[in-house]
Image (cartoon, grey):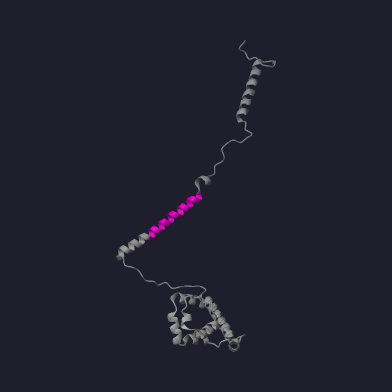
Amino acid sequence: MHRAYQPILPSGSKYLQEKWDRASYHEHRRKVQAAKSMVDNNSPETFAHLNLKFKKLKIEEERLSTIERDNQILLEKMSAIMRTRGRIDNKNEYKSKSLNSEKRQRELRRVTRENKTILERLKQVEPQYDHLKWLEDWYKAEKHMDNIARYPRGWYIAQDSKPRSKTSKATSAKVPKQCKNAQAKGSKKKTAGDAEQEEVTGKLLSPVTSTSSTCNPQN
């Protein structure tokens, strides 16, 4: 009797209670095994287009087809060279073809015609400034400058072209080299009027005075 099924609750038949308890237990185990989790921790779904990469395969196929076409063209050229013993085909029978050549020619003729019209209009326009009046004003300005000038025009050039007198040559020959350098430096600061006055007074000076030991270009 100790091995007989002992139900937890009191029952009228131990055999029937055992059968019912075993059936409920198997049903519970089945439900436990078939239960679904509340959190989905399975691996994500895999898509075919991500694994196969049809775009990459298509690009590779196009590249291979291009290579195959280039190889075929090269093979035809090589076979033509072998048949014709490498002669060069330098014929150029291509003729330029354009669908809008007539329109472009009409446009070019229109632009040329307008440019000619503009050129004719520019040629017929009268100038706003009179160059003859400008030249007359310049002559008047030169006349006024001659009237207010201290010396006549071209006086300095005429003075340089005059031959020097013998007395000035003699005095310049006796002047020491240091005095000549000092006089040359001092003459740069003189005006035209001072140069004329010095030339006049230089003729009156004696050779002894011009060859003095003290050289002062300001005197």
Q: Nearer the viewer, residue 123 or 2?
A: 123
Please name whichever residue, 42 or 210, is drawn nearer the observer in this view of the structure. 210
**For residue 94, which quarter of the picture?**
bottom left
Quarter-wise, where is residue 131 in the image? bottom right
Q: Is residue 61 magenta?
A: yes
The percent coordinates of residue 158 (x first, y second) are 49, 87
Residue 213, given in percent of the width and then of the height, sits at 47, 75
Q: Residue furthest top?
A: 1
How many marks are shown on the rendered structure?
A: 0
Give, as a single range, the part of the protein colored magenta: 54-73
Q: Is residue 89 left or right of residue 66?
A: left
Asked if residue 93 is positioned above or below residue 13 in the image, the reply reads below
Task: Name the foreground residue: 66 vs 173.
Answer: 173
Q: Is residue 71 above or below residue 153?
A: above
The majority secondary structure of the magenta stretch comes to: helix
Q: Position of residue 91 (x, y in %)?
A: 37, 71
Residue 22 seen in this snapshot? yes
Q: Residue furthest front?
A: 208
Image quadrant of residue 39?
Answer: top right
- Percent position (x, y) of residue 151? 56, 87
Q: Is residue 132 visible?
A: no
Q: Residue at the location (38% across, 59% down)?
A: 72
Q: Residue at x 46, y 81 (%)?
A: 208
Q: Is residue 139 toward the left or the right of residue 176 in the image?
A: right
Compared to 115, does 40 lie above or below? above
Q: Residue furthest left?
A: 85
Q: Quadrant of the N terminus?
A: top right
Indicate yes or no whether the magenta region holds residue 86. Answer: no
